[in-house]
Image: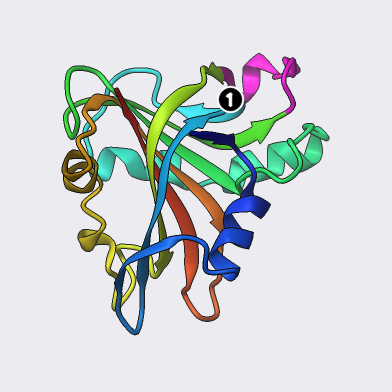
Amino acid sequence: MRSTLSSGAVLDELRDERLVRLEAEPHYTIYDAGVKQAAAMTLLVQSSGLPISLGAEMRPYMDTVRLWEYVRANDVPLKPDSPAEVYVYNWVDRAQGPMVFDVGVVVEDGYRGVDPESRFVVKRYSAMKVASLVYEGPFPHQPNSGWHRIRWEDRARDKGLVYTERVYRELYHRYDYQTHRHVTEIQIEVE
């Protein structure tokens, strides 16, 4: 089991065809990135703070314009070679139920320089064992998306893994708004 948080490593594996292709269509491809020990990370996030539901309640947190303005204006020390953005679904009771939703960027460990007025929060996420898939293609709201075909929980169960239903996260390694071949790593915490 390997440990990584490197976007470069994921993109290299994709480019060098070292990931197992699970499903390929003209507009998207789904790869098995294996089971790994996901490294601990510190994020600067905009957080729901309290549990919310999937859907419309998530939208304000998915708009990261203010977050990026804050990062640039305050010289926030982003961790090199980390995902462009990370979405963390911290399930309260079970997957797909209420969650504390965090959207942010990976910062250097030890960063604490958040202005309390900003409404951003620094959170530390522990290392965890994850089942990882990589999706290359359009986002769910874009035409020709294969997002519904990812089936992360089913694919983990088929390998004999047990989804803890505590954490699901999306690591956005590359955005590509010209071809809509975005690269997203989906990680679910497993036992």
Callout 1: helix, strand or loop? loop
**Which corner quadrant of the image does residue 79 belong to?**
top right
Q: Is residue 141 above or below residue 128?
A: below
Q: Residue at x 72, y 15 (%)?
A: 112
User: What's the magenta bit mostly, secondary-structure-wise?
Assistant: loop
Residue 83 in the image: state x and y as whole percent: 60, 46
Task: Check residue 111 for magenta coloring.
Answer: yes
Q: Is residue 87 left or right of residue 96?
A: right
| Magenta stretch bounds | 108-123
Q: Is residue 30 left or right of residue 40?
A: left
Tell me the residue that label 1 is attached to. 120
Nearer to us in this view, 127 or 58:
127
Q: Residue at x 22, y 48 (%)?
A: 155
Q: Residue at x 60, y 27 (%)?
A: 43
Nearer to us in this view, 103 or 166:
166
Q: Is residue 107 left or right of residue 171?
A: right
Residue 88 in the image: state x and y as whole percent: 42, 33
Q: Residues within 10 Å of mark 1 (few under 14, many from 20)?
A: some
Residue 165 in the image: state x and y as whole percent: 23, 26
Nearer to us in this view, 23 or 57:
23
Q: How is the image coloured?
A: rainbow
Task: Check residue 23 for magenta coloring.
Answer: no
Residue type pointed to by label 1: Phe
Residue 48 in the image: state x and y as whole percent: 39, 26
**Which corner quadrant of the image does residue 163 belong to?**
top left
